[in-house]
Amino acid sequence: MDSYLDPTEYKSGAIPVEELYDRLCEASRAIDGLTFNRIVAVGFEKLTPNQQGLIKRAVAKQADFCYQNAELIESPLNSYSISGVSMSFDRSKVMQLGGVTTTAEVYSLLLQTGLAYRGVI
């Protein structure tokens, strides 16, 4: 499956070109998980232009977040401390839902689409 965001639409520039397509595809799969595969069920092209735009922004932000924080996200540690200095994710900005680590900003974009609603539709 391809990405919901074409590499030519990606504007951030945080991800090297040679990794961009794979990172966007990984981010799209994360977005599918956060939206309970509702995008796959309906079809991206059948969503409203507003929903498509929000999803594309969410994919770009998720790809940037995962690229910039890859070592921390992939680490089995929840937090650690060395010589009195400790480190952990800020729970108000970073969340984990259904095995996907994302930011509150990405999740907020998905909530605006109506596709991340946790209740029964």
Image: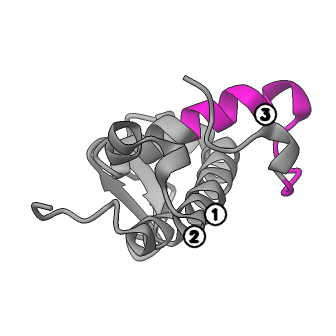
Q: Residue at x 69, y 44 (%)?
A: 5
Asked if marks 1 and 2 touch (Cβ < 8 Å), the reply is yes
Residue 53: give its label. Answer: 1
Q: Residue furthest left?
A: 120
Asked if marks 1 and 3 touch (Cβ < 8 Å), the reply is no
Residue 50: give its label. Answer: 2
Q: Residue at x 65, y 46 (%)?
A: 63
Q: Residue at x 42, y 49 (%)?
A: 101
Mark 3 falls on what kind of element?
helix
The residue segment tinted magenta is 11-27
Quadrant location of the C terminus in the rendered image: bottom left
Mark 1 falls on what kind of element?
helix
Q: What residue sits right under mark 3 in the picture? A: 20
Tell which of 66 and 1 is nearer to you: 1
Where is residue 92 shown, x and y percent of the image? 41, 77
Q: Earlier in the sequence, mark 3 or mark 2?
A: 3
Q: Amino acid at mark 2?
A: Asn
